[in-house]
Image (spheres, rainbow, N blue to C red):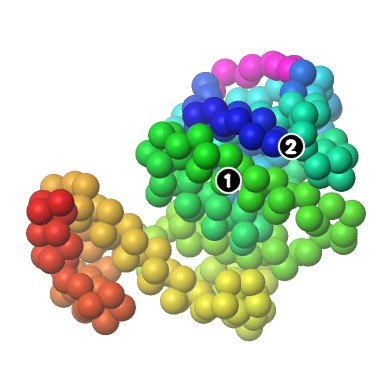
Amino acid sequence: MSTTGTLQVALALRTYSEQVERHAHDYHQIVLPQSGAMEIEVDGRGGRVDWSQGVIIPAGTAHAFSASAANRFLVLDLPRSSTGADTTEAERLERLHQQNFFAVRPEIRHLLDYALHSEPLLTRSSEMAQAWSNLLISSLVQPYGRTPDHGQLTLARALAHIENNLDTHLTAAEIARISGTSERRLYILFEQHLKTTPFAHITRLRLDLAMDLLRDTRLSISEVAHRVGYADQSALNHALKKNRNLTPASVRRGAKIS
C-alpha cells in the first residue's frame, strides 16, 4: 500500500526470508514488527526487530538482515526530504537515524494493533494509510532528544509477552518477571501509560481475538475459548457477557447475517 501526502510515505506489509540479505537505498526506512523477528545490522550496529523494538534505517546506510521462518513487518519508506513538508518536521526526520533502534512504546503499540486489525482499510484507502503513517512519525519524532523512558521499554516487553501468550495462563508475577520489573511497578506502568490494569488489557485482547475467530473461522466455540486463554466455553461466554453484553453464539450469528 502506498500513500501520497506531505510526507510522501510508502507503507507496506512485507515478509522476509531466513537468508541474509544486504541492502542500501536512497530513502529512510522504518521497520516495525507484526509477527516474527528480524536480526539486522545497520551501519555496523547489530540489533533485533521484534514485538518490543523497531529500527530506523537512514538513507544510504548499508544494512544486512535475516528473519525468522514465519514473519511479517510493517515497513515505511520515507524520502530524504518531502516537498511541502513542515521544515521543522523534515529536519527532525533527518535526525531520527541517530537512534536506530527504538522501543515499541504504548502509543506505537496501539498504532500497530490498529494496522493489524485494519489492514483491508489501510490497503484500500491511501488517505487512511497516510494518516496512520503521520501518527507513527509524530510518535517517533516527539521524543527526539529526550532521555529515554525505560518504563516505556519495560511496558513494551510486557505487552509483547501478553500478545504472544494469550492462550496461556498469564499472571502478573510472570509478566513482571519477563518484563524485568516488579508487580507493583507493572501496575503503575499500565495505569500511567494505558489508563488500565494488566488484566483488563488482557481481557480486552482475548475478547477481541475471540470475536475475530468467531466471525472469521469455523472453529468450535470451545476451541475458540482455548485459543484465547479461557478454560472452556462457559468461561468465554461469561467474559463476553460481562464485558460486552454478548455471547459467542450471538457473535457468530451476527457474522452470518452480515
Badge 2 vs badge 1, beta-carbon distance below 8 Å: no
Q: Which residue is mark 2?
A: 56
Position of residue 51 measured from the top left corner of the image (x, y, whole percent): 57, 49
Q: Quadrant of residue 154?
A: bottom right
Q: Which residue is mark 1?
A: 131
Instruction: Say left or right for 34 vs 156.
Output: left
Task: Find out whether residue 21 is within the magenta segment.
Answer: yes
Residue at point 14% right, 59% down? 254
Query: Above or below — where is 9 with respect to 166?
Result: above
Mark 2: few/some/many CA within 10 Å (<14, 14-19, 20+): many
Q: Which residues are magenta?
A: 18-25
- Amino acid marked by disc 2: Ile
Q: CA distance from mark 2 to mark 1?
A: 19 Å
- Amino acid marked by disc 1: Ala
Instruction: Say left or right for 27 vs 3.
Output: right
Residue at point 82% right, 38% down? 90
> Which of label 2 and label 1 is nearer to you?
1
Of 184 and 123, which appears nearest the observer? 123
Query: Above or below — where is 63 with respect to 125?
Result: above
Task: Find out whether residue 27 is within the magenta segment.
Answer: no
